[in-house]
Image (cartoon, helix red, strand yellow):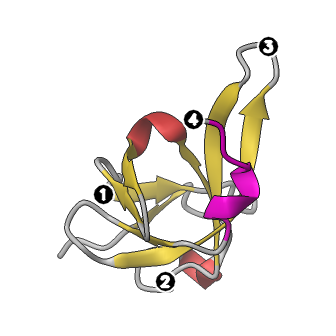
Amino acid sequence: MLEEVTAIFNLPVYTPWGAYLGDLVNVIIDSDEGEIASLIVGNTNPALVVDSAPIAIPFRWVQAIGDIVILKYFPSSVPIKAPEGMEATVPAYQG
């Protein structure tokens, strides 16, 4: 069954433990394979992502997509590109 990728935009995204992560705002398509490579999550939960920055989630981390997106994996820390001299990882939600 074919669907437009825009049909999943703005769906809420949840971690495996049920915490709201953010909203699906875009996707990255692997044009060679013709499939979704990553989901871009915006309006992220500040308890999980520093400064509510948008993040890319590998599509292999997705468990299900329906009325919401449920992840089957989300790391305990989110690596970020930090300014020089600052810590390179930021702890994520430990709940």
> Considering only order in the chain, which callout, 3 or 2, is on the residue closer to the N terminus?
3
User: Residue 15, located in which quarter of the rendered image?
Assistant: bottom left
* Residue tagged 4: 1
Give residue 60's position: percent from left, percent from top: 44, 34
Check the image and report above or below for 34 versus 51. Answer: above
Nearest the viewer among 41 and 85 is 41
Query: Which quadrant, please, contains the N terminus?
Result: top right
Gap in angstroms between the C-alphas marked 3 and 4: 20 Å
The residue sitting at 41% across, 46% down in the picture is 62
The residue sitting at 41% across, 84% down in the picture is 47
* Residue tagged 1: 76
Number of numbered discs on residues: 4
Give the mark toward the camera: 1 or 4: 4
Q: Is 47 on the left-hand or right-hand side of 88? A: left
Q: Residue 15 carries which label?
A: none
Q: Is 66 on the left-hand or right-hand side of 9? A: left
Q: Which mark is residue 45?
A: 2
Check the image and report above or below for 52 versus 36. Answer: below
Residue extending farthest top:
32
